Image: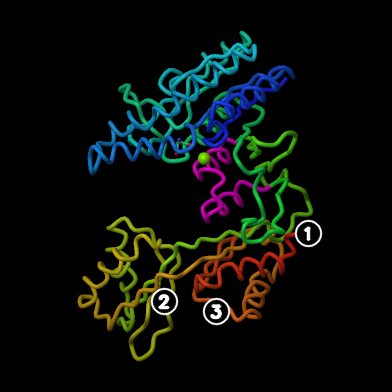
Amino acid sequence: MALIVQKYGGTSVGSPDRIKNVANRVAKYQAEGHQVVVVVSAMSGETNRLIALTKEVAATPDPREMDVVISTGEQVTIGLLCMALQAAGVKARSYTGGQVKILTDSAFTKARILNIDEAPIKADLNSGHVVVVAGFQGVDELGNITTLGRGGSDTTGVALAAALKADECQIYTDVDGVYTTDPRIVPEARKLDRITFEEMLEMASLGSKVLQIRSVEFAGKYRVKLRVLSSFQDGGEGTLITVEEETNMEQPVISGIAFNRDEAKLTVLGVPDKPGIAYQILGPIADANIDVDMIIQNVGHDGCTDFSFTVGRGDLEKAAKILEGVKAHIGARSIVADKSMAKVSIVGVGMRSHPGVASRMFRTLAEEGINIQMISTSEIKISVAIDEKYLELAVRVLHKAFELETA
Ligand code: ASP
Ligand code: MG
């Protein structure tokens, strides 16, 4: 007998029929002798609908009241799922985040989980119930309703699995696992049987939006065995996200290729090459809460240098305005903005023990005439910034060069 936490996303509970399907799947697990805790999202589109409603009433809704509104979607699905389970002959009980006491801080709309009272859930499981918990929501010390940020039901699932010391946390979604890259770009992309937490973090933060990043961090920290599976398919093994020691010895060099289309580049031309320049340029950018990703400073000539960095495309205008404002002060000649950048990254823990990965990547891109504008690396990732129009080509040739379709 195992204790399993299953989390079902919005599309998996997107209609009454789909909710009945989920109930049948849960019933099957319980009939096999497992204890099951289910976490559900709101029906697909519901959270967006609720957010749109708040915007119609107030331009900048009060965050506390925002959470009161947007947490309601999950309350509907927990009730409906319990009814469907009961109709299937399964004893089931639903709980909101406040009822099971998913205690969070008071950072409305992006709260963090501090503690979960697992005793009542354990008691229900021991009396043969399936426990259904609303994802995405919690309660702060004062009893205020909080939410965990978009996609936060994943984190609810993982946090419950950690608190209950579950054998596995299964995330049911509309894809059957984590792929080597986006199959819409590379049809030969392959489902991975396993991936490490570290790799998954790099993949998730770069655009393969299978799991909320925080849930992966959480799972890594508490060593929760995490599995991504399709709720529309029976019998698949999905992708297991796990610690490195547990992956097979013959780790492929590269596990996947992630990309992000929404990058933009800013270049400050002709700034004096002296101490403090990077700080003077990036300080005001950071003060405006704009995330900077890649950075390069060119070798100086005649006491001057050029300084480039990338930001999310949505932040480009704001960042450019800030730079125009400090241009005179820092003694820069001009500011150039390029909004059509993309980032492509190869990710793999195998890179640690295999030299020559970067050169293979650069050669592959060179052979296609793709100009690399910036490079950044970590121990398990190499990223390049390129012109957005070459993004799909770059992903395809790299997928092939690292033999990801056959690995
Ligand atoms: N319903 C919330 C959202 O759409 C939480 C979730 O689905 O994980 O972001
Ligand atoms: Mg989701």
Q: Are marks 2 and 1 in contact (CB under 8 Å)?
A: no
Magenta span of residues: 195-223
The first of marks 2 and 1 along the sequence is 2
Residue drawn at the location 31% of the way across and 37% of the way down:
53
- Magenta span: predominant SS is helix
Give the Cα distance between marks 2 and 1.
Answer: 39 Å
Q: Label 1 amino acid?
A: Thr
Question: Which numbered circle lies on residue 297?
Answer: 2
State the scheme by which the image is colored.
rainbow
Q: Earlier in the sequence, mark 3 or mark 1?
A: 3
Query: Which quarter of the rendered picture does the N terminus lie within?
Result: top right
Was residue 91 drawn as part of the magenta stretch in this picture?
Answer: no
Q: Could you tell me if residue 343 is visible in this image?
A: yes
214 magenta-colored: yes
Q: Report x, y in % for residue 18.
A: 59, 29
Check mark 3 vs ligand 2: CB closer than 8 Å? yes or no. no
Residue 242 visible in rendering: no
Quadrant for the C terminus, please.
bottom right
The numbered mark, 2 or 3, whose residue comes first in the sequence reads 2
Tell me the residue that label 3 is attached to: 371
Q: Is residue 90 left or right of residue 74?
A: right
Q: Residue furthest top?
A: 127
- The three-letter code of the residue at mark 3 reads Asn
Q: Residue at x 58, y 78 (%)?
A: 370
Task: Report the residue marked by disc 1.
Answer: 406
Which residue occupies the foreground of this view, 28 or 163?
28
